[in-house]
Image (cartoon, rainbow, N blue to C red):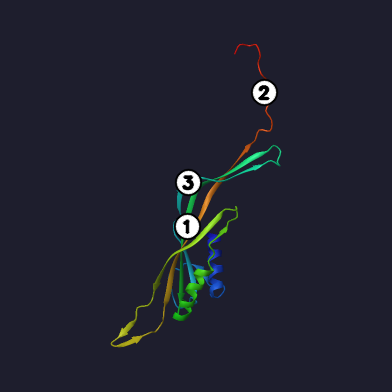
Amino acid sequence: MRTLAHSIIATAAEAAGLPAGRVTTQSAKDNITLPRPRLEVQYLPESYLRTGRVLCRQRDGASTPPVQRTRRELYAVRLPVVAHVLADDDAWLDAFTPAFVAALPPGVNDARGLWVAVRVQRAEFAGYAEKRVGAATVNVFTKRSRLFTIDFTWRVATEEVVRLLTDITITPRMGQGG
């Protein structure tokens, strides 16, 4: 699921104007050699919620013998991802932020055909404190960043296959007293 989350975030970031190849996992420490603007992704612990609800029931009469397929959700899984956008330019970051949120899809289907919901939960702004010497403002290296918390929610599901009865033969017992 992390691969799917990373590809969704990378696609949305590039559509919003981030140069290609600038979406990475979280670096140990920020330094001047790492290119800006860039987006660092950090995965937080997943949370599982036991549900057990039925997602769909389908009868397949074309198969031999006919069957009924029941897809049941066992768990709803939530993966919070922190997307940290680092930039030097305020104007670029202000333009990138709404474009990035708008470029994220509401959800996609995973490899098993189950819906993965994508939601931006919150954004935090950092790097806006001014460094002052007396009355003058000193800007040596401008560091601006926005920290997005994005939730990816998907399901763990099973599929049960039950054979359906095609014909019934009733043989009555006559005269046996029961």
Residue 28 against residue 175 in the figure, above or below: below
Residue 167 against residue 29 in the figure, above or below: above
The span from disc 2 to disc 3 (Cα, nearest Å) is: 40 Å
Q: Nearer the viewer, residue 159 or 47?
A: 159
Splitting the image into 4 quarters, where does residue 131 fall?
bottom left
Q: Earlier in the sequence, mark 3 or mark 1?
A: 3
Residue beneath disc 2: 170
The circle drawn on residue 79 is 1
Residue 130 against residue 26 in the figure, above or below: below
Residue beneath disc 3: 51
Q: Position of residue 117 (x, y in %)?
A: 52, 58
The span from disc 3 to disc 1 (Cα, nearest Å) is: 17 Å
10 Å crowding of disc 1: few (<14), some (14-19), many (20+) = many
Q: Amino acid at mark 3?
A: Thr
Q: Earlier in the sequence, mark 2 or mark 3?
A: 3
Q: Amino acid at mark 2?
A: Ile
Quarter of the image with the C terminus is top right
